[in-house]
Image: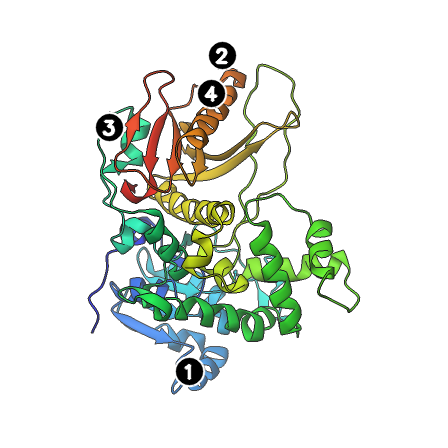
Amino acid sequence: MTEYKKRIADALLDEKLSYMGAVLIRGPKWCGKTTTARRIAKTAVMLADPVKGKALRMLAETRPDRLLQGEHPLLIDEWQEVPMLWDAVRAAVDEGGRGMFVLTGSAVPPQVDGKNEAGQEIRHTGTGRIARLTMRPMSLWESGESTGEVSCGDLFAGEDVTGGRNNLHLEEISELICRGGWPGALGLTGRVARGPAKEYYAAIAEVDVSRVDNTLRDPGRVQRLMRSLARLQGTQSSAAVIRADMLANDVQSLTEDTVYAYLNALRKIYVTEDLKAWSPNLRCKTPIRTADTRYYTDPSIAAAALGAAPGDLMNDLPSLGLYFETMAIRDLRTYAEALGGDLFHYHDKSGLECDVIMRLENGSYGLVEIKVGGGSLIEKGAATLTALERKIDTSKMRSPSFKMVLVAEGEFAYRRREDGVVVCPLGCLRP
C-alpha cells in the first residue's frame, strides 16, 4: 500500500469535526478526498463501489437510517449518488452530537430550494450541522516539491523571509504543470506522469459533465469549450468571448446560454474555480471591475486540453506563464484556507490589475503578483503592487501585511530594500 502523504486538509478536517456534527469534503475527482476521509473514519459507506454500490444505494433510498449505523466518524463516499442522505445525516447529527459523519462529493451539493437537480427533495441546507471543506489537487508543498522554507503565516506576521531556498527550475516547473497535483501521479515521470491528467480530461468530456445534472452534452463541444478555457485562463472572459473562440471550430449553432450551461456544469464538478473580485476602500473614485477571473482547478487540465507537453511550454514562455499562474493560484488557495483565509483579484477601469489578494478572516491581507521569470517581470510586478498600495485608503482599512512577487524560479526568496516587496519562488512556499 502506498504511504499516505500528509495533506493540509487533514488538520482542517480534524478541527471541523471537533465542533460540527458532520463535514462535507468537496472537490474534483482523484484529488484525494476519500483517502483523507478514510484516515480518520471508523466506518465507511462507499456508494460508488462497483460491487456493493448498487445495493448500498437501494438501501439508502429506502432506509437511510440503516446506512448511518456504525462506529463514528462514519464516512459516506460520493454522497450525492443518493441526495436524500443529506437530510438523514442532518437529522442524525441533531440527535447525536459532534464528529459523527464525513461526506465526500465530487459534485456540488443539491440546490437548497426544496429539490436538487434530479428532482429529489432536500429539506435542509445543513447549516449549523454540516461544515464544508474544499480539497484540490496537491500543492507543491503537499507533494514534496516545495521546500516550505517561506511561510505565508510568517509573511502576514511581518517576519523576515530572506534566504528561503528553492530547488525548482523552469524545466521542473513545466513537468509539474503537466503532471498536476493528482496523488495518483506522484512518483511517475515523463509521459506516464501526464497520464492521470489526460484520463481525467477525457472522463470530464465523455461522462462527468453530463452526469452532474443528467443533461446529455456533446463530448466534442465540451472539449472545445475546455480548450477555449485553457487559452483564456487567468482572464475575465465573458461567455460571449468564449463563444467566439469556440465558433472557430464549432459548426453547430452555439448560443451564450449554452456556453453558460456548460461553464456551470464544469464548475459543479470542480473542474474550474473562479477567483472573485476584491473591492477595497480607495483614495480615488476609480470604478472597480467585478467580473470573476477564470481558472482551472489544476494546471494539468489545461495542459491536457491543449495537448501541451513540458517541451511545448519551454518553447513558449508566455503560455508557460499562464499555466504557472494557474498552478500558483491552486497552491495559494490551499495555503490561504489553512490560515482561515481566501483569495481574490483586483482589476479597475484604469487598467490596474493585481493577480491575487490573499485575505484572512481578521481583515489582514497581502498583495501578490505572479510572474514566471525574473528581471524586468519582477520590476513590473513590484510596480503594480506599489501602485495598488498607494490607491488603498488606509484611513478606512489597514495597510497590506505584505507585497509579494511570486516567481517560477530563483534560488532564494528575498525582500527588496527599495519598496519592501518580497520576491519568492513558488517552490519554497507553504501555509
Per the image, the residue denoted by label 1 is 53
Give the secondary structure at mark 3: loop
The tag earlier along the polypeptide, 2 or 3, is 3
Please identify the quadrant where the C terminus is shown.
top left
Residue 298 visible? no
The tag earlier along the polypeptide, 1 or 4, is 1
Contact between marks 1 and 4 (CB within 8 A): the answer is no
The residues tagged by marks 1 and 4 sit, at their Cα atoms, a distance apart of: 56 Å
Per the image, the residue denoted by label 4 is 386
| Three-letter amino acid code of the residue under disc 1 | Gly
Per the image, the residue denoted by label 2 is 395
Q: Judge the density around disc 1: few (<14), some (14-19), many (≥20) Cα neighbours within 10 Å.
A: some
- At 41% from the left edge and 45% from the top edge, which residue is drawn? 328
Give the secondary structure at mark 4: helix
Q: How many dots with numbers?
A: 4
User: Could you tell me residue 130's position as x and y percent?
Assistant: 42, 55
The tag earlier along the polypeptide, 1 or 3, is 1
The tag earlier along the polypeptide, 4 or 2, is 4
- At 24% from the left edge and 45% from the top edge, which residue is drawn? 167
Q: Nearer the viewer, mark 1 or mark 4?
A: 4
The tag earlier along the polypeptide, 3 or 4, is 3
Task: State which quadrant residue 110 falls in.
Answer: bottom right
Give the secondary structure at mark 2: loop
**Name of the residue lying farthest toward the right:** 253
Q: Nearer the viewer, mark 4 or mark 2?
A: 4
Residue 426 visible? yes
The residues tagged by marks 1 and 2 sit, at their Cα atoms, a distance apart of: 58 Å
